[in-house]
Amino acid sequence: MLRYRTIKKEAEAELLVEKSRFIAYVKPVGSKEEADAFFSKIRGLHRNANHNVPAFVIGERFEQQWASDDGEPQGTSGVPMLQMMIKEGLTNVALIVTRYFGGIKLGTGGLMRAYTGAAKQALLAAEICEVHELALLAFSMDYTYLGKLQNLSENGEFQILETTFTDKVAVTIAVEPERTEELRKTIANLSGGRVTELSEGKQLVKKN
């Protein structure tokens, strides 16, 4: 089940526009505190820059949103970057673009294009991905049935995440939430009902 879209990793990109350098940095974050720490780190790297323009979106429904123009004309940098992320459906992302002024004024439209252009390049470098919720089910069964289960998993409908061997074999399986009952029936059929369900939970995983 798709929960939200985000980025896989921290990344950066640089854009040169009319002799001004725009260096964009992005990072996946889970809280405002993480975003603030990331912004502080980048500001520390570029203390002599003319501007360090930050923005973040956090929450599956974009509950936390914030941006600053950091001295640029109002609405020309931070807010367009924020709006771009929301339009792309991205969340749990911190983004900051550093600008070193090159002596040529870009105007309102030029600034917006430069900041969002650098930001888009960094987001692509960070690899946009989907976060899905999977159900986790653990079962205990005789060794006899493990091979059959492994063969069935090759069709991609579920994934065996962990296998523990004692007097019996315990397997933890990830499956789409809407297919949990189908998985239970499949395992019951292959074992003739001689299987014990140990637990049920859920996990968020990133997918391309």
Image (tube, helix red, strand yellow):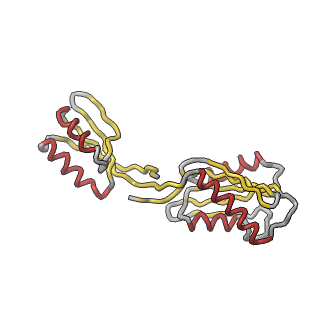
Q: Position of residue 162 (x, y in %)?
A: 34, 37
Give the residue furthest to the left.
192
Q: Position of residue 57 (x, y in %)?
A: 59, 61
Pick the residue in front: 130 or 68. 130
Give the residue furthest to the right.
103
Pick the residue in front: 5 or 66. 5
- Quarter of the rendering containing residue 69: bottom right
* Residue drawn where x is 24% and y is 40% of the image: 151
Q: Which image quarter holds the N terminus?
A: bottom left
Pick the residue in front: 141 or 160. 160
- Quarter of the rendering containing residue 101: bottom right
Q: Is residue 59 left or right of residue 19?
A: left
Q: Is residue 56 left or right of residue 106?
A: left
Q: Position of residue 189 (x, y in %)?
A: 14, 47
* Residue drawn where x is 73% and y is 63% of the image: 114
Q: Position of residue 43 (x, y in %)?
A: 75, 50
* Residue drawn where x is 71% and y is 56% of the image: 97
Q: Is residue 38 left or right of residue 107?
A: left
Q: Is residue 197 left or right of residue 128?
A: left
- Up the image or down, 167 lies above or below 125; here it is above
- Up the image or down, 148 lies above or below 123; here it is above
* Residue drawn where x is 53% and y is 55% of the image: 128
